[in-house]
Image: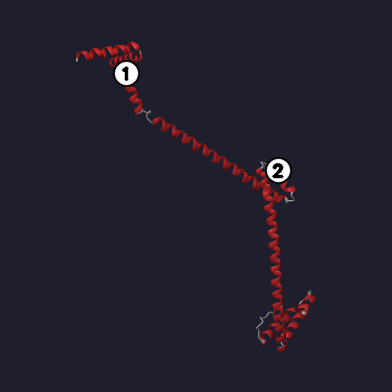
Amino acid sequence: MATLYDTLGVPTHATDEEIKRAYRKAAMKWHPDRNHGAEDVARAAFQEIRDAYAILSDAEQRKVYDTVYAEQMREWEAQHTRRQRAQAKREAAARAAEEAAYAEMVSIAIRFADQGHNRDVLFGVLLGRQCEPQRAAQIADSVAALQAARRDEADVAQHAERMRKTANSAQAAEAGAGEPEPTETAHETSAASQTARHDTPHAKRADHAKRDGSASDMHPAGALGNLWFQFLNSLKF
């Protein structure tokens, strides 16, 4: 916003003498007689210089101008601030809407990529959703690259898991091959010893006699023989 001080090229706190010198210098520069070929422009500028000097050279008029100018400046600054705030709100709303639209397009592309579709299909789907070609290509390229990276990462993880399981199986096999064979238990050893004792000739005779005794006890003739043997033994005493 140009002021009368700007027209003369002096600061707002300029003295009367400084205003007079500035007026003379500007008047000589823009006098129509000194601007051949541009008389109309020079004449308009010269008139503005004269009007500015007429007001600023008069103390009363300068005071009124300063007061009015200060009020106008405050109003202009307030309007300018309001315009800036409104512009900032409009720009923020536009950015928010653009970001939301971009996020929606990315979400759509990711959904189709998860279904196994390639980059060209993603690009076509975005174009069908009224997405700009340049942006659609950018989103399709980015999403396709992201999906490829995820697949590669999953393949690496699966390979690492298989390698880990293979290593664990090999270690378990090596540990099993180095262990001694299990020994017989005490019960098995005792049973084996008893079997060995029964297999000796003396043990066989004792078992045979025991079986004969058991058989004689069970047979009636054997029972009578035992009674007769006991009777003969009682006669010796």
Q: Which residue is mark 2?
A: 121
Q: Is residue 228 above or below residue 19?
A: above
Q: Nearer the viewer, mark 2 or mark 1?
A: 1
Q: Position of residue 195 (x, y in %)?
A: 33, 20
Q: Nearer the viewer, residue 160 or 209?
A: 209
Compared to residue 34, the image places residue 210 above or below, namely above
**Along the viewing direction, whichever of 80 and 215 lies nearer the viewer:** 215
Q: Which mark is residue 198?
A: 1
Residue 145 relative to residue 43: left or right: left
Q: Is residue 140 visible?
A: no
Number of the label disc, if any, that sits on residue 106? none
- Dot 2: element: helix
Residue 32 is situated, as x and y percent measured from the top left of the image, at 78, 79
Is 148 above or below relative to 48?
A: above
Question: What secondary structure is found at the residue carrying circle 1?
Answer: helix
How many other residues sit within 10 Å of disc 1, few (<14), some (14-19) or many (≥20)? some
